[in-house]
Image (tube, grey):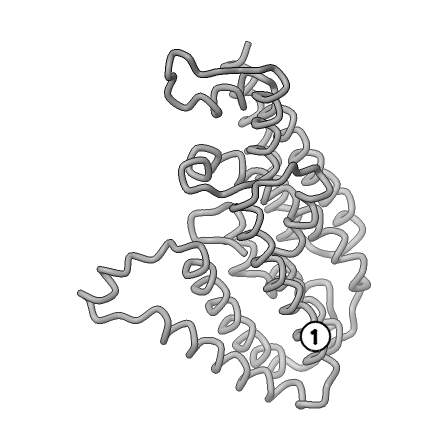
Amino acid sequence: MKKENSIGFYLFQNLLLIISTGYKIDDKKKFSAFQNGVNEFKDFVFLQDGIIDNDIAWVSQFENNTNILAQCNQHYKNAIFSLLQIFPSDHLFWEYLAAEEKLYYSYIIKEKFNNIRRPVLEISDFEEMSYNKHNLALVPIKGMDWLFEAKAGYDDIKKIFTCIFNGMQMMDDIDDFAKDQASGQWNLLHSNVKKIITDENLVNDENLNRFEERIFYASGLCEKYSLYALEQYNNALINSEKFDFPELKIWLTQIIEEVQESIKLVQKITQ
């Protein structure tokens, strides 16, 4: 899931409104109640992400008498209480949510493992990570599929968002390359840079600052994976053209333009 300063924040913050045009909503009250539960769950996930990533200013938490742990727990309880008003406890929704949560949390453990062991990663590993880190965003979409008549099938919408997840995650990893390097976050980009250093016996004899980051740009990896992100966003836009998601198309068009500008900048500085 995304933090407030990420390109995906708007998408996840307004997910139900963005996709609502793809459904025949014949009960506004039920839709509003579902929105409330989804918003509580989204707030829970955002706060939890910060805790998992150790992005919390604990001193400030204590000095200002705030408690992100209590807030996170309260959002989760609020979400469950709200969603139980929509889906009875024996509804398939709860089995689906449990399965997606298991997938999400299992990958968090794997990600922490990778940060320590630093295995060689391939694009298939990246796409597994990208999906599993964002799969909870699909829960509201599946919920809408149960609640209202859909103009597009769940699998069709899932295909669109899987491409979006890949594009967002890749651009996040590119933008955070130096930050992740410093914090020990291991991903496909750092694995690729490490492989180049090993294969070409590169040594930072001059103790250059940001040695790995220089290799990331000079080797063409940044451009290569920026183009990958662009392709993923374009695929999402092409697939969304078949359905009535005007807000999603606008968002995708804007993001594609931003990625294109980013690629031009990378090409300029690496020429």
Residue 153 vs residue 20, the one in the foreground: 153
Name the residue beneath numbered marker 1: 25
The residue positioned 36% from the left and 76% from the top of the image is 70
In the rendered image of this protein, does residue 121 appear above or below residue 140?
above
Q: Position of residue 38 (x, y in %)?
A: 56, 72
Q: Position of residue 215 (x, y in %)?
A: 52, 20
Residue 268 vs residue 77, the one in the foreground: 77
The residue positioned 50% from the left and 65% from the top of the image is 45
Residue placed farthest to the top in the image? 271
User: Could you say whether the residue bearing mark 1 is in a helix, strand or loop?
Assistant: loop
The residue positioned 52% from the left and 79% from the top of the image is 79
**Position of 180 compared to 117: left or right?**
left
Q: Quadrant of the N terminus?
A: bottom right
In the rendered image of this protein, does residue 31 appear above or below residue 271?
below
Q: Position of residue 22 (x, y in %)?
A: 73, 63
Q: Quadrant of the C terminus?
A: top right
Residue 257 vs residue 5, the one in the foreground: 5
The residue positioned 63% from the left and 85% from the top of the image is 86
Q: Position of residue 161 (x, y in %)?
A: 69, 53
